[in-house]
Every structure is written in C-alpha cells, then in structure tokens.
Amino acid sequence: MSTGLNTGDSAWLMVSTAMVLLMTPGLAYFYGGMVRSKNMLSMLYMSFISISVVTILWFLYGYGIAFGDDAGGAGLIGWGDWRLGHIAPTALQGAIPEQIYVCFQLTFAIITVALISGSIAGRARFGPWVLFVVVWVTVVYLPIAHWVFADSGWLSKWGVMDFAGGLVVELNSGISGLAMALVLGPGVAFRRGEGPRPGNIPFVLLGLGLLWFGWFGFNAGSALTDGALATRAFVSTMIAGCAGMLAWRTLEWLRFRHLTKLGSTSGALAGLVAITPSCAFVSVEGAFAVGVVAALVCSYAVELKLVAGYDDTLDVVGIHGAGGIVGVVALGFLSTGWERGTPGLFYGGPASVLGKQVVAVLAVAAYAFVVTYLIGKIIDRLFRMRTTEEEQARGMDAAFADD
C-alpha cells in the first residue's frame, strides 16, 4: 500500500464523488417523470431532501458507525471518528485524503435512501418521510455498510464480494422498499388496477442519462485508484447497461409483440444495478452476461407485485432488489479472481464462494426487511406517514404544500 499521497488517485476520487452525487438529482428526475404530473414535485423533493439530511448525519456520526473501528470485534458496527471536523485535510486513507473518501462514501448513503421513495411514490407524507430518512440511514444503512464495506465488517472479513454496493445500496434499497410498500399498503390507483402513467417521459430519459453518467463514478470510483481496476469497472458498467437495455427490449418483443415506452430505461437500469457488485471482478463477457440475465430476471420480477398485491410503484423491488441479487450471486460463478476477489465456479473456484454470496444476500435482505418494516410501522403509527385517499386524489404536490 502506498504510504504517501497519490494526486492522480485523489483527483479521480474527487471527480467520482461529484459524479455519484449527481446521481441523486438524476434519480429525482427519473422518478419525477415516472409518476403522474400531480406527484412530480413531491418526488423531486423526496430525493433532494436526502442530500441535506444524510450529509449532516454522515458528518455528525454516520461515517464513524459505518467505517470506524469495529465495536466489540463482531464486525457488526463501527465506533469512532465522531464529528469529522477533527480529520485533517492531510490525513490519508491509503493514498487518498480521508476527507474525500468520507464524501465519496456519503454519496452512496444519500442515493440509497432516496431510492426507497420510488416504492411509496404518491402515498407518503413529506414530514414523516424526512424522519424516516434519519432513522433508516442510522439503523439500517450504517450497520450494513459496516458489514460489507469496512475492512472489519463480518461479511468483508468472511470474503464476501461486493465491489460497489450490490448489497449495501441495491439489495438494501430494494428490500427496504418492499417493507415500506407493505407498511403503507397499495395506493388508490393500484387497487383500481390502473397501470403506471408517466407524466414526463423526457424527464425519465434525462434522469437515466444522469444516472448512467454517475454510475461510472459509482463503480469505477470504488477502485479508489485511476488504474486498471477502475478501467475494468468502467468498461463493465458500459457493457452491462447496454446489454440490459437490448435484452429487455428483445424479451418485450418476444412476449408481447410490441415495445413499451419505458422498456429501454428499465433494461438499462437493470443491467447497471446488477453490474454494481461485480464490475471489477468479471470479464467483458461476464459483464455482458450479467446485463442480459439481470434484464431477463428483472423483467419478470417487476410483475410479482401484481401477483402478490404489493404496490411497488416505481419498481424499486423488481429492479434494484432483484438486480442486486443477480449481481451478487453472479460473482459466485463469474468472478475471475483478477486483481481482487476470489475466482467463481466457472474459473475454478470452490463452491463456498457461491455459498458466501448467497448467505450475504439472505443476511442483508432479512435485516433490511425486518428493521425497515418496524421503522415504517412506528413512524406511520405516530405521525401518519400514509396519505389519505383524498390526498392521493388531489396529488402529492398539493398535499406537499400543506405538509
């Protein structure tokens, strides 16, 4: 490990941090365009408020819980580095300034909680949502981030592979979105059997473009260097997104003999989600396979809500939850063991590699679902998080003005 500052790596991480931060406004536009026009403003604000709230939490105590020295030695939670003003600009995390590393990891926390808003679009009051952001990041995101991203986390020490957040960001947000969808129940439109009515398709495409651009910083930036590892992550991200887009469109045509308005965006998003944990561990061919499989799996997963009766309004469960599972489990087969990680089954690795990836999925999903469900129930009981049928009929933009 380098013992001095690497200016090239530092510059790359600064750029990556800005790119990942841009993903949250991109998500706001993506979600804002997906909902009906009467709910557009509220969806934008639900994402944007995450930036300010999570940033303050992160600098007060969040980074210390997620990345501080392990408390108790069990790998469950960090402890230390409170009030980050005491970290000097010259302090290093490897060969990069620790303050920049803090900001880079902050952007992951911001977008993860913002993603959950898509599962409850049009039926969550703004005030209780802000409270949910505070509690959820503290009780759900920070421990899971410690498990996976911190060197002392139990999943990290066990050898579980997750390069850029398939467990911490994608699966976590998807399963938490499922829990909140169950807490708040289906909306009026869902109970009537009404399908999605995107209010602004250009907003959706603009949002996808910003998300895709930011994803290069998300994945390649997680290398924390500007070298070969970042290059592999960058290329894999591009390939998987494109493969997912084409696979989803192809499946649509084979199944329905027509193409939907949002098929391309959903397919690209599925590929990008699934490549997140595996981008630096798989080959170019592996990235293509991950994108295709993710699109196929997610295209069916988004239909589960119609069978099970939960209102995952913007398909957070079907795309981020299912896509995260595909990407994490795929490493048990497709990891090359190049530079980092352990070879998967297709590259001569042991079956235990796949087993660890599956256990990690189950552990993160179970914790995220149970704790998020309890948080949602308590907040809804105390502060009425769910909107009334009248508020849903008026639209959340009008209700937001009254909140």
Image: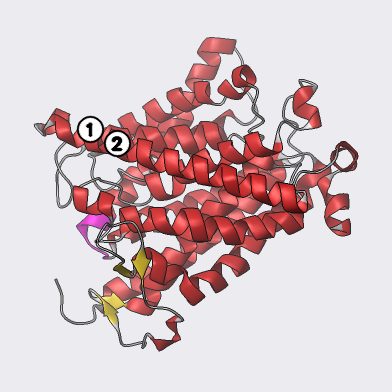
Q: x, y (%) of residue 79?
A: 36, 70
Quadrant housing the N terminus = bottom left
Q: Is residue 238 visible?
A: yes
The numbered disc on residue 359 is 2
Q: What is the C-alpha distance between the residues marked 1 and 2?
A: 6 Å
Question: With respect to residue 181, does 55 lie above or below?
Answer: below
What kind of element bears circle 2? Answer: helix
Question: With respect to residue 198, does 91 lie above or below?
Answer: below
Q: Residue at x 79, y 45 (%)?
A: 39
Quadrant housing the C terminus = bottom right
Q: Amino acid at mark 2?
A: Val
Q: Residue at x 32, y 38 (%)?
A: 328
Residue stretch in magenta: 225-230
Q: x, y (%) of residue 78?
A: 35, 66
Assess disc 1: are there few (<14), some (14-19) or many (≥20) residues with their C-alpha within 10 Å of its C-alpha.
Answer: some
Mark 1 lies on residue: 355
* Membership of 340 in magenta stretch: no
Q: Are marks 1 and 2 in contact (CB under 8 Å)?
A: yes
Say whether residue 207 is left or right of residue 38. Answer: left
Q: Residue at x 39, y 34 (%)?
A: 325
Question: With respect to residue 152, does 190 lie above or below?
Answer: above
Q: Amino acid at mark 1?
A: Gly
Q: Is residue 15 visible?
A: no
Quadrant in the rendering for residue 284: top left
Q: x, y (%) of residue 148?
A: 32, 53
The numbered disc on residue 75 is none
Say whether residue 259 is left or right of residue 339. Answer: right
Say whether residue 55 is left or right of residue 37. Answer: left
What kind of element bears circle 1? Answer: helix
